[in-house]
């Protein structure tokens, strides 16, 4: 069992992960509109990953006999200034998610909820990767530039990304 306070906080984060999926899908759609199919692929897979993050929270609430609240989906922005701007936005968004995950850990510690604290450590580690990936691509886009062959090269690299579902937890 988890406390009502913890349950509410995890439900809020589940909602934010679903919003993250929507945001990245909107970025994917924007990149498709520019014929940057590799960028679009990268964001589409990112959106799928965000749904796995949300479902992990969903499953945890249920497992702890709580009530998972399925949220209304807030509409993300549909237009962006440039492909570079999408990665600037993605990095900023991931920094916010990291701060929210850290807040959840703070609540778990304050509530002496060791099980939730352990559960949340997966997200703590994941956020290091999330920020690093967004930053790595942003730096590449900045360095190579957003015109011509450079952009095409990055687009080809981003086309290689495939969706890998997170490993199931050990029983
Ligand atoms: Fe679910 Fe990108 O953090």
Image (cartoon, grey):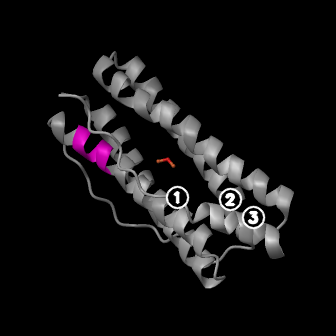
Residue at position x 35%, y 66% in the image: 72
Q: CA distance from mark 2 to mark 3?
A: 5 Å
> Marks 3 and 2: in contact by CB < 8 Å?
yes
Main SS, magenta residues: helix
Q: Quadrant of residue 130?
A: top right
Give the image location of residue 44, x and y in percent. 48, 66
Task: Say which residue label 3 marks.
Answer: 84
Q: CA distance from mark 1 to mark 3?
A: 18 Å
Give the image location of residue 32, x and y in percent. 58, 79
Does the magenta-highlighted stretch encompass residue 31?
no
Q: Between residues 81 and 36, which one lies in front from this camera angle?
A: 36
Task: Say which residue label 2 marks.
Answer: 87
Which labelled disc corresponds to residue 31? none
Q: Between residues 119 and 2, which one lies in front from this camera angle?
A: 119
Task: Say which residue label 1 marks.
Answer: 161
Helix, strand or loop status at disc 3: helix
Q: Note whether 80 is above or below 92 in the view shown.
A: below
Magenta stretch, residue numbers: 55-60
């Amino acid at each position: 069992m988890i406390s009502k306070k913890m349950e509410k906080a995890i439900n809020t984060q589940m909602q934010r992960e679903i919003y993250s999926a929507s945001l990245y899908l909107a970025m994917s759609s924007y990149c498709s509109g520019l014929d940057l199919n590799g960028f679009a692929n990268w964001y589409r897979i990112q959106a799928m990953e965000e749904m796995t993050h949300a479902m992990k929270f969903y499953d945890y609430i249920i497992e702890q006999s709580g009530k998972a609240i399925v949220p209304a989906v807030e509409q993300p922005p549909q237009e962006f200034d440039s492909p570079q701007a999408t990665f600037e936005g993605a990095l900023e968004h991931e920094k916010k998610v990291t701060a929210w995950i850290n807040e959840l850990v703070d609540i778990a510690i304050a509530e002496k909820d060791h099980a939730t604290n352990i559960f949340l450590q997966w997200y703590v580690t994941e956020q290091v990767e999330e920020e690093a990936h967004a930053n790595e691509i942003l730096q590449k886009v900045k360095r190579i530039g957003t015109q011509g062959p450079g952009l095409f090269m990055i687009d080809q690299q981003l086309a290689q990304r495939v969706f890998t579902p997170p490993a199931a937890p050990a029983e």
